Image (cartoon, rainbow, N blue to C red):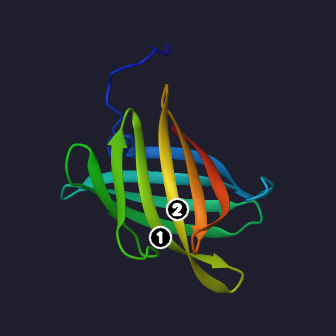
Amino acid sequence: MLKKNDSARFDLLAYFEGHTLAHGVFEDRGGRIKRRFAVEMTGRWEAGAMVVDEDFLFDDGERQQRCWTLVPKTSLTFTGTCADAVGEAHGHISDGCAYLRSTLRIKVGSRLISMDFDDAFYDGGGGLVLNRSTVRKLGIRVGQVLIAFRKA
């Protein structure tokens, strides 16, 4: 049952512990869906960091893998790194939501292009987390990613 103004703090890093399944879409700036994908994730604590292995399967058959290392800095802030990140990602938790700002090198055709991602994660209750990520290149919005995470 959902409660209005639930005071429990949303802990995104703890949420990703164990096995998580997700489905999502990338839509262009005009709102047209360009890609659909599924993600299987496994998270584990290692030396005080949450390590999250992500296996993506896109609707065109392409597969991608990414491994994030998310490090809590305070009870409300964290940082993240992965192989295709440009520098360090910075996250914080506020009012039952988690936010993460990162720059990733994304494969577009045969090129790798740096894109900025502004992620917002919302606790939907019952093991559901919703994610909206605004994607920009050189400050210009190129689209958004919408993902629904569900504990397996």
Q: Position of residue 32 (x, y in %)?
A: 81, 55
Count of picture labels = 2
Q: Is residue 24 left or right of residue 71?
A: right
Q: Position of residue 12 (x, y in %)?
A: 37, 43
131 w.r.t. 137: above or below: above
Compare residues 20 and 130 and report the one nearer the observer: 130
Write the residue at 54% across / 52% down.
40
Looking at the rendered structure, the kind of residue marked 1 is: Thr
Which numbered disc, 2 or 1, marks the residue that appears first in the sequence? 1
Q: Quick one: label 1, few (<14), some, or many (20+) residues within 10 Å? A: many
Looking at the rendered structure, the kind of residue marked 2 is: Phe
Q: Is residue 36 left or right of residue 9?
A: right
Proximity of marks 2 and 1: CB atoms separated by less than 8 Å: yes
Which numbered tag is attached to residue 16?
none
Q: Which residue is mark 2?
A: 117
Q: Is residue 27 left or right of residue 22?
A: right
- SS type, badge 1: strand
Write the residue at 65% across / 56% down.
144
Disc 2 from disc 1: Cα separation: 6 Å
Q: Which residue is mark 1?
A: 103
Snapshot quadrant of residue 9 = top left
Write the residue at 43% across / 76% down.
86
Write the residue at 34% across / 42% down.
93
